[in-house]
Amino acid sequence: MADYSYRAVTKDGGVAEGVIEASDERTAIERLRNSGLIPLNVTAPKEGGLRRSFALRSAKGEILTFTTELSALLGAGLPLDRSLNIIAEVSEPGEMKDIVHAVLRSIREGSSFSDALQKHPKVFSRLYVNMVRAGEAGGILDVVLEKLNEFLESSQELKDHVTSAMFYPCILAVVGTVVIIFILTFVLPRFSSIFADMGGKMPFSTQMILWVSEMFRTFWWVMIAAVFAGGLVFKKYTDSAEGGLKWDRIKLKLMRDVIVKLEAARFCRTLGTLLKSGVPLLQALNNSTEIVGNRAIALRLREIHKGAKEGRGFAEPLAAANVFPPLAISMIRVGEETGQLDTMLIKVAVTYEKSLREAIKRFMNLLGPVIIIIMAVIIGFIVVSVFMAMFSIFDLPV
């Protein structure tokens, strides 16, 4: 048994907070519902409380919290305007609270929920708005929000996994760079003065290292400006249609396994969620293609829309695009033939999300040693060059 902190809505619309003892989170939710409460948030404070609270302060975390709470309130039978009013009252002061008030005001003025959300494109994506619109049209808004909540949770979990996997290589790269800069700017100048006083000809490698050190100490501001300007030029180039496409093709060649699995999982989960929510196939294909990050893959996926529009179905144009692995194509073809395309797409996403974690783990296990080797070679070259110069001192005439 563990203690779970909760925030719930009472029958009269008030907000109750407290702690409940249960064996797991699902049991805690059931106990709250049996007691007449509508649970908004149930968490275990002892397990990653700091990390969870930090995540909820981010923009995507706030959207996830908003979707979870609204899904719970609508599922309990509360009307939309009252549910939004409760969420606005319990939300912490900030941008999200203001947005909820604005959405509620638009609805009371006669706008639909999806149209009210569409007025805030920086917060609610086209995918989010289209799923809500499909739920409104089918009268299943609470069900759609529940599926949308599952989609946001899985997407956030995958993103957190990638971010945490990148943490160690980034730390190695930063620490290695700082060490190299320290050696070039503080250590080598001391040896430079010693070698100059002793006279004699230094080895070429030592001369080169000392020249780099001198350039770095004298023109450090030029180097920083050059790096900054180069970054801006590179960003501008990759933001353009042609440059971005070329860069994405390069990334696809370098990390094909990771990128293909990432985009396959993202595309299939989005498409499957949209189809389950009642969004038409052609519209769902458009929305799913928009969330694909690699433009080289997205370009090929747009051909699928044309094939589906011509009546060739979905699996055949997808196979012709030659983007996703054969296993994904086979599973999607089975789903299309059995009339369970939406369910099979979710299964494909789950399969490749699991495979992606393994691929990222292998890539990071390789990237860490590669960074260490590169830094070791650079530092080793500097150290060897210094020692060669020191040994050359003994060859000088006394």
Image (cartoon, rainbow, N blue to C red):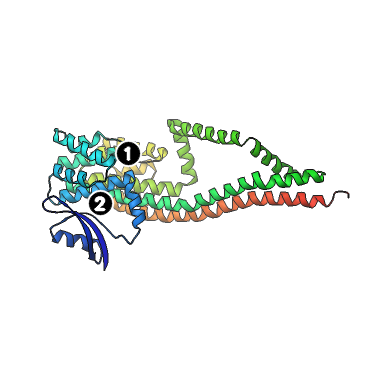
Tell me if I can see residue 294 in this picture: yes
Residue at 29% x, 46% y is 62
Q: Nearer the viewer, residue 199 or 135?
A: 199
Q: Quadrant of the N terminus?
A: bottom left
Q: Which quadrant of the figure has residue 112?
A: top left
Q: State yes or no: discs 2 and 1 in contact (Cβ < 8 Å).
A: no
User: What amino acid is at disc 1?
Assistant: Ile
Q: Nearer the viewer, residue 337 or 47?
A: 47
Q: Is residue 251 above or below residue 327?
A: above
Residue at 71% x, 51% y is 384
Q: Secondary structure at mark 2?
A: helix
Q: Nearer the viewer, residue 301 or 34?
A: 34
Q: Which residue is mark 2?
A: 343
User: What amino acid is at disc 2?
Assistant: Thr
- Percent of width and height locating residue 356: 40, 53
Q: In the drawing, what numbered circle is on residue 304?
A: 1
CA gap between label 2 and label 1 equals 19 Å
Residue at 74% x, 52% y is 387
Point out the residue furthest to the right here. Answer: 398
Q: Secondary structure at mark 1?
A: helix
Q: Is residue 281 left or right of residue 74?
A: right
- Percent of width and height locating residue 343: 25, 51
Q: Is residue 151 above or below residue 215?
A: below
Point out the residue furthest to the bottom here. Answer: 1
Q: Nearer the viewer, residue 297 or 306?
A: 297
Density class for disc 2 (Cα within 10 Å; few <14, some 14-19, many ≥20) is some
Density class for disc 1 (Cα within 10 Å; few <14, some 14-19, many ≥20) is many
